[in-house]
Image (tube, rainbow, N blue to C red):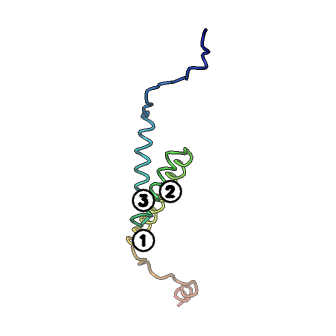
């Protein structure tokens, strides 16, 4: 008698899947951004660590999370750079040494007199 093919367990053996170059680059980028987010929270210890871990998990799991976290981080950096540039520009600004404005009435009196 012939056995049914369904009696045998189906075993699929595959070699472990290797990460592609894009996944490796994404992992490195996520680690860098997560470290910067953790450092920029301003608090060391558990809160910074949790912020970094959350950012990395969001980046690695969801493509839109990558755009959101990285975009928010870059926008914050640009905003801080602009504030710093404005502060430096105000510090370097020369004081106003122009003569005081001449009023029209005073000019007319000086011209007649």
Query: Is the Cβ of the residue at disc 1 closer than 8 Å to that at disc 2?
Result: no
Query: Is the Cβ of the residue at disc 3 closer than 8 Å to that at disc 2?
Result: no
Q: Earlier in the sequence, mark 1 or mark 3?
A: 3
Q: Which residue is mark 2?
A: 75
* Pair 1/3: label in front: 3
Viewer-closest of 90 and 1: 1
Viewer-closest of 52 and 37: 52
Q: Position of residue 7 (x, y in %)?
A: 59, 20
Viewer-closest of 8 and 73: 8
For the N terminus, the image quarter is top right
Tag 1's secondary structure? helix
- Considering every residue shown, the one lying at the far bottom of the view is 113
Residue neighbourhood size for the residue with mark 3, other residues' Cα within 10 Å, grouped as few (<14), some (14–19), many (≥20): some
Q: Report, in whole angstroms, how far the alpha carbon at label 1 lies from the one at label 3.
A: 36 Å
Q: Position of residue 60 (x, y in %)?
A: 49, 45
Query: Is the Cβ of the residue at disc 1 closer than 8 Å to that at disc 3?
Result: no
Q: Residue at x 42, y 69 (%)?
A: 87
Is the residue 74 above or below the residue 86 in the image?
Answer: above
Q: Earlier in the sequence, mark 1 or mark 2?
A: 2
- Considering every residue shown, the one lying at the far top of the view is 1
Q: Which residue is mark 3?
A: 49
Q: Position of residue 77 (x, y in %)?
A: 45, 58
Viewer-closest of 84 and 88: 84
Q: Earlier in the sequence, mark 3 or mark 2?
A: 3
Q: Residue at x 47, y 50 (%)?
A: 56
Is the residue 94 above or below the residue 23 in the image?
Answer: below
Q: Which residue is mark 1?
A: 90
Q: Position of residue 16 (x, y in %)?
A: 43, 30
Residue neighbourhood size for the residue with mark 2, other residues' Cα within 10 Å, grouped as few (<14), some (14–19), many (≥20): few
Q: Report, in whole angstroms, how far the alpha carbon at label 1 lies from the one at label 2.
A: 23 Å
Q: Which of the labelled discs sits on residue 64, or is there none?
A: none
Q: Report, in whole angstroms, how far the alpha carbon at label 3 lies from the one at label 2.
A: 21 Å
């Amino acid at each position: 008698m012939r056995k049914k093919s369904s009696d045998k367990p189906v075993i699929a053996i595959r070699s472990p899947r290797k990460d592609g170059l894009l996944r490796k680059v994404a992992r490195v980028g996520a680690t860098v951004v997560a470290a910067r987010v953790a450092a920029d929270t301003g608090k060391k210890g558990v809160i910074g660590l949790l912020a970094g871990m959350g950012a990395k998990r969001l980046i690695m799991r969801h493509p839109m999370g990558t755009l959101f976290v990285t975009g928010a981080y870059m926008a914050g950096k640009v905003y801080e750079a602009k504030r710093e540039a404005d502060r430096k520009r105000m510090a370097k600004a020369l004081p106003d040494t122009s003569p005081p404005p001449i009023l029209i009435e005073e000019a007319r009196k000086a011209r007649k007199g």
